[in-house]
Amino acid sequence: MITLKSAHEIELMRRAGEITAAARAVARDMVRPGVTTAQIDKAVYEFIRSQGATPSFLHYNGYPASVCVSVNDEIIHGIPGKRVLQEGDVVSVDVGAYIGGVHGDCAGTYPCGKVSDENMDLIRVTQQSFFEGLKFAREGYRISDIGHAVQEYVERHGYSIVREYVGHGIGHNMHEAPEIPNYGKPGHGPRLLRGMTIAVEPMVNAGSAAIINMSDGWTVKTTDGKNAAHYENTILITDGEPQILTNPEKSLV
Ligand code: MF3
Ligand code: CO
């Protein structure tokens, strides 16, 4: 069931979204050579707790950390640990924060030091594909119009869209209906209505779309070993322009 959020719930989600966006900025600012992914996790945990919120991912289905850090051919759900970031790495971070009974969820991919032009292009196209989808996140369109726009943009740039993982409604639960694929024909799925809150999150592979699930039970990698990128925001459907609740520009830090 897709829930429409009340004005009060939307205010709560704005607060959760602000903290989540700020936590992403904390992680982003730690992406540099020599930093371990566990150090990023600790900083994100402490930041989220300092805001009076709880990390949404910690213990979610047994996930052991507050942030996902996915490096190079890791697409999503990389578990922080001893890995030391290297110059040239492509680093995706994904965070969620829970406060006031609601969640925020956002992700971004950042260069570690200087990365190749090819990797910068992958990062930029992935981020822009979110904004291409956002153009259709309005009343009058349907869910699949978002994914269609994302897919068109990504494939036009020679990259591929991951199919096995999708965006989602979000609110009192991190994952709510509807599912929001980053691909498909336009004009399908539920109609978008004001008061819906959704997380749109393209996962883009530089090479083939094929994925492989690692034996740690979480990490998802590209099968061909080429790099991947991820970009996600929690957004609110309104009677006009969509609003980004995890806005990087309105970040607390
Ligand atoms: N942003 C991811 C998602 O939307 C976060 C899930 S990671 C998990 O599914 F560890 F919490 F599962
Ligand atoms: Co998500």
Image (cartoon, rainbow, N blue to C red):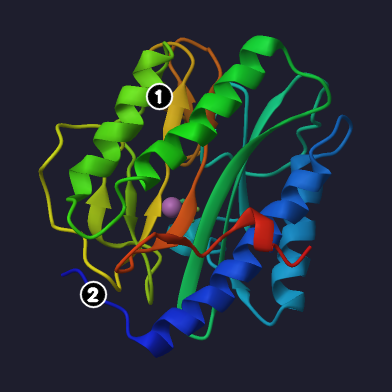
Which residue is nearer to you in this view: 210 or 120? 120
User: Residue 94: percent from the left, percent from the top?
Assistant: 57, 48
Who's the residue at 40% across and 65% down the image?
174
SS at badge 2: loop
Q: Disc 2 designates what residue?
A: 3
Q: Disc 1 designates what residue?
A: 212
SS at badge 1: strand
Cα gap from disc 1 to disc 2, whole angstroms: 33 Å
Which residue is nearer to you in this view: 138 or 3? 138
**Is residue 239 visible from the viewing direction of this image?**
yes
User: Can you tell which quarter of the image residue 79 is in?
Assistant: top right
Q: Which mark is residue 23?
A: none
Residue type at the position of mark 2: Thr
Q: Is residue 94 left or right of residue 178?
A: right
Who's the residue at 28% across and 43% down the image?
146
User: Residue 142: percent from the left, percent from the top?
Assistant: 17, 50
In the image, residue 246 above or below residue 214: below
In the image, residue 211 above or below residue 172: above
In the image, residue 52 above or below residue 31: below
User: Can you tell which quarter of the image residue 87 is in?
Assistant: top right
Residue type at the position of mark 1: Ile
For label 1, being within 8 Å of ligand 1 is answered no
**Is residue 209 visible from the viewing direction of this image?**
no
Front of the two marks 1 and 2: 2
User: Residue 52: percent from the left, percent from the top?
Assistant: 68, 82
Who's the residue at 47% across and 62% down the image?
60
